[in-house]
Image: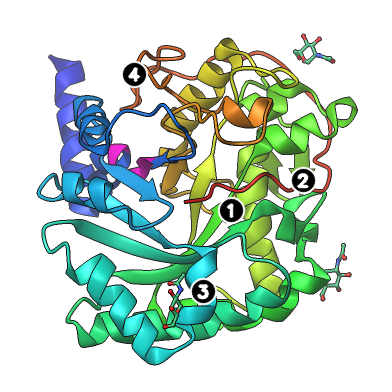
Amino acid sequence: MARKGVAFRMFSMALLLGIIASIPRSVDSIGVCYGMSGSDLPPASTVIGMYKSNGIKAVRLYCPDKAALEALGGTGIRVLVGAPNDVLSNLTDKKAAESWVHDNIQAYPSVSFGYVAVGNEVAGKAADNIVPAMKNVHSALDKAGLGHIKVTTSVSQAIVVFNEPSGANFSKEAKKFMGPVLKFLKRTGAPLMANIYPYLTYAYNTAGMNVSYALFTSPETVVKDGKYNYQNLFDASVDAFYEAMRKLDVSGVPVVVSETGWPSAEGKDATPENAKIYNQNLINHIRSGTPRHPSPIKTYLFSMFNENQKDKGVEQNWGLFYPNMKPVYKITLLGTTAPSPAAAPALAPAPAPDSLEEC
Ligand SMILES: *[C@@H]1O[C@H](CO)[C@@H](O)[C@H](O)[C@H]1NC(C)=O
Ligand SMILES: *[C@@H]1O[C@H](CO)[C@@H](O)[C@H](O)[C@H]1NC(C)=O
Ligand SMILES: *[C@@H]1O[C@H](CO)[C@@H](O)[C@H](O)[C@H]1NC(C)=O
């Protein structure tokens, strides 16, 4: 009885302080990427049925796939949709952007669009098109009365160079386009989307790191960064983005993790067991945020299926499900199990690029 009393008072206090709201909402923070580079995937209507039956409330589509968008209508599943790299130069034309929005967004009034990601890991000369394209898509959405849909771009972790978050910088090449990109995001209240893969950082430098730092299973601090203690590479990578932004005098642009995951086969430490450990720990972890930003992190798991049209080897093995819809491993997508502790130390090397999801 006494215990109940205390619990109840704490609950009321939490309500008063308004902090309770962040607890139950955390399950909404996880989405799953729906990559389509497979010749043997189920039809979109079946796939969206799997999202529903697994309680997945958000999806990332790499392009405005008609069948997927039709299946998503009326489901309430939040959609992050890509304007793929090959339409970027077209979108620098105002009229082309209006017609893209007309055909791919306005055409689906019962779809709950949350974000449009203009470009995915755009690099080189094409990066000059990101901001003009984002501006045109933003204006076109506004004009269509859809200004609540945020326009952003998805970047590779490879654009941030760091050992510990406080020392993070955007690469020399990325600095050129990230300045204007961040200015646009700040002005429009949109987040930056980043594809963050502790697995890749680990796999490219296994000698420099204990796998537990990448798997969220280190029992202790691995990287001490001033007053901030990092026990996992995911947090360090997210905070590296925030610190790199700070060096460009940008604050208040949140980071959304637009891809992360762990492969289950054909790579260093790529097993169903490790993939399950990473993804389950991730789901349980993101609600509490990072040492520098302790609030829930919107995150999209990569990916729904193993995709046989990606590069041979590890790239084909990032799925939660096989194309025959059987799970690769058992995972609680709504996040109810506690993370399990295990191992320890080393430092994060420069992140490595990953292979791109295409439409
Ligand atoms: C780009 O625009 C041109 C001219 O309007 C059009 O012919 C072409 O199909 C567009 N490309 C894409 C990928 O949408
Ligand atoms: C990061 O950038 C800052 C400011 O431009 C510079 O002072 C610092 O030396 C850079 N750090 C590294 C590790 O390159
Ligand atoms: C990683 O850390 C764990 C626990 O701290 C330890 O048992 C394991 O031997 C370490 N692995 C390597 C390769 O050092």
User: Is residue 168 part of the magenta span, yes or no?
Assistant: no
Tell me how far mark 2 sits from mark 4, CA to CA.
31 Å
> Mark 3 — residue?
88
Look at the image and tell me whether residue 166 can be seen. Answer: yes
Q: Nearer the viewer, mark 3 or mark 2?
A: 3
Q: Which residue is rendered at x = 72% and y = 22% of the image?
A: 267
Instruction: Name the quadrant where ligand 1 sits.
Output: bottom left
Quadrant for residue 160, please give it: bottom right
Residue sitting at the far bottom:
94
Which amino acid, by three-letter code, is at mark 4?
Met
> Mark 1 — residue?
292
Asked if the residue at label 2 sits under 8 Å from ligand 2, the reply is no
Which amino acid, by three-letter code, is at mark 2?
Ala
Q: Nearer the viewer, residue 354 or 174?
A: 354
Q: Which residue is rendered at x = 20% and y = 18% of the image?
A: 3
Mark 1 element type: loop
Q: Which residue is rendered at x = 63% and y = 17% of the image?
A: 265
Which amino acid, by three-letter code, is at mark 3?
Leu
